[in-house]
Amino acid sequence: MFNKETVYQGYSLGELAKVRNVLAQNGIKYKVKTNNGSGGGSVTGGRRGITGPAGMQSRFERQYEVVVNREDAEQARYLINEDKHK
């Protein structure tokens, strides 16, 4: 991805939705990458949703990364930042 730049990284699915919406509304093409911080392991039984492998909190199991074309990165960051301060 030599022509791409990351404009958002986070663990919140809600924030990811806001970022995706603001980019789509402004015609900026993007891709979302999901990084599974738990190493692919699954949590089973009564502890599901509380912790993952080695006590990792479930809200940090997945990290979301939004990448855009390099020429759109500055505008995308500006729009994301503006949307956060509404």
Image (tube, grey):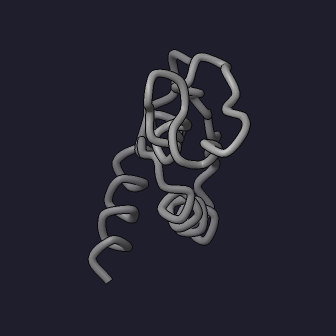
Above or below 6: residue 80: below
Between residue 17 and residue 3, name the one nearer to us. 17
Image coords of residue 55 (percent x, y): 43, 30
Q: Residue at x 56, y 57 (%)?
A: 13
Q: Residue at x 38, y 55 (%)?
A: 75
Image coords of residue 45 (percent x, y): 72, 39
Image coords of residue 76 (percent x, y): 43, 54
**Total number of numbered labels?**
0
Give the farthest residue toward the left: 85
Image coords of residue 73 (percent x, y): 41, 43
Is any atom of residue 72 visible in this view? no
Give the farthest residue toward the front: 46
Above or below 33: residue 84: below
Between residue 22 and residue 12, name the one nearer to us. 12
Is any atom of residue 41 visible in this view? yes
Q: Residue at x 59, y 17 (%)?
A: 39
On screen, residue 17 versus residue 45, left or right, reads left
On screen, residue 3 versus residue 40, left or right, reads left
Q: Give the quadrant of the C terminus.
A: bottom left
Q: Residue at x 48, y 55 (%)?
A: 12
Q: Give the quadrant of the N terminus.
A: top right
Where on the picture, by quarter, is residue 7? top left
Between residue 22 and residue 53, name the one nearer to us. 53
Between residue 1 and residue 52, name the one nearer to us. 52
